[in-house]
Image (cartoon, grey):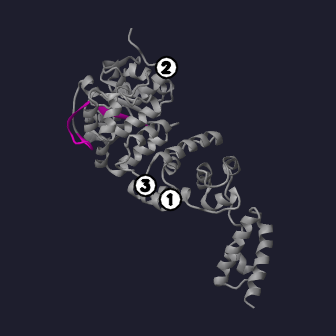
Amino acid sequence: MPERLPPADWRARAGLAALCDALGAGEGAARFVGGAVRDSLLGIPVKDVDIATVLLPEEVMRRVKAAGFKAVPTGIAHGTITAVLNHWPVEITTLRRDVTTDGRRATVAFGTDWREDAARRDFTMNALYADPPDGTLHDYFGGRADLAARRVRFIGDPHARIAEDHLRILRYFRFTARFGTMDPDSADYRACVARAASLMSLSRERIADELLRLLGVADPGEVVAAMIADDVLRPVLPEIDAQGVARLRTLIAREAEADVAPDPLRRLAALLPPDEALADQIGARLRLSNKARARLRNALAPIEAETPEALAYRIGTTGAIDRMLLGNAFQVTDIATVKDWQVPRLPLSGGDLIAMGLEAGPRVARALQALERAWIAAGFPAEAETRALATQIIVLELRSTQ
């Protein structure tokens, strides 16, 4: 009796059955593949649905449109079409085989052999297929057994799989942190350690994206510790050491204590030495956005504040929570104070101060700064009390110029 996928909500999404019919799934021309199959077997929510098919991309485009769905040629050169079903995307990819690879990208040819398509994938747990009509599983490389054993295993020779795409080193550790169990003695782990220097050939954007995905899993502490101990990240991030791992583990515990969702960028800040200038350099090296780099700097900068609210006002709620969880400001218990706090705006402007009798000019900016400091110290009062504070500041300002 063949094994089948368990019933799942995602398989009943509007339009999916019609799409599969259009692709000839009933005749074996299309199957679900990858994460949707893997996650269904694990009993966890499915986010993305991917379909593999023997149909050529142009035929996929034609059938998707004929079925009344939008077809987007997102990666048609590599055989991928995105069908949009009621505002959610389904990626459809023609079966492929690698012609040439250089560790960063591959030249592919289209095929019709399901096993050959499975053989070019990274891990056995990602090479599981299921027939749309009844969920019958197709497992060519023992992925079902590996999934049950929580074992992340490359398909075939791990060195060969890594040579095809060096990013698979980081993917191995991410999948181990999310689905697997650490086994430093396995051939897969040893191959990743041995080939770590090849990460230098990848773009920093790809490295950053995969690293942040790794840091976003529930608890990557054990895996990251192993990566640092065995110098996997040294080629691209030599600044991270065992102390950084200790800070990461402390942060993960504090996130749980404060009931705050894991945040990859905050966890990266924990791994880095507590030096805002160095954090900015590393952010630039990883080609992070200006916004992400600013957040790293804020998380590690020595910003003073009298209260949690004052800190949140000055650097934002996210920044304040970063600093509290990283142990750089106040206590974890103070997070509740600002977690759902709406950062207020100073009720008065420079124009209001002029209307209250202050002459336009440099003194307005000086008085407004003084008012903001007094307003923060007073606990962000409403407009009436703020006006009383402004009156006192204006009087002092006028006296200082007499």
Element under disc 1: loop
Q: Which of 222 and 9 is in front in this view?
A: 222
Q: Which of 183 and 146 is in front in this view?
A: 183
Element under disc 3: loop
The residue depicted at 69 percent of the width and 70 percent of the height is 372
Q: Residue 173 placed where, x, y %?
A: 40, 36
Cα–Cα gap, marks 1 and 2: 50 Å
Going by the numbered disc 3, the residue's amino acid type is Leu
Going by the numbered disc 1, the residue's amino acid type is Asp
What residue would you read off at disc 3? 288
Q: Is 368 positioned to the left or the right of 30 in the image?
A: right
Q: Does the magenta stretch include residue 96?
A: yes
The residue segment tinted magenta is 89-106
The residue depicted at 26 percent of the width and 23 percent of the height is 115
Q: Which of marks 2 and 3 is nearer the N terminus?
A: 2
Answer above or below: position of 148 versus 2: below
Q: Is residue 86 magenta?
A: no
Cα–Cα gap, marks 3 and 1: 17 Å
Q: Which of marks 1 and 2 is nearer the N terminus?
A: 2
The numbered disc on residue 18 is none
Which quadrant of the view contains residue 142?
top left
Q: Which quadrant does the C terminus fall into?
A: bottom right
Going by the numbered disc 2, the residue's amino acid type is Pro
**Can I make out residue 54 in this image?**
no
Q: Nearer the viewer, residue 45 or 401?
A: 401
Which quadrant of the view contains residue 379?
bottom right
Answer above or below: position of 240 versus 140: below
Element under disc 2: loop
What residue would you read off at disc 2? 7
Q: Which of 23 and 176 is in front in this view?
A: 176
What residue would you read off at disc 1? 275
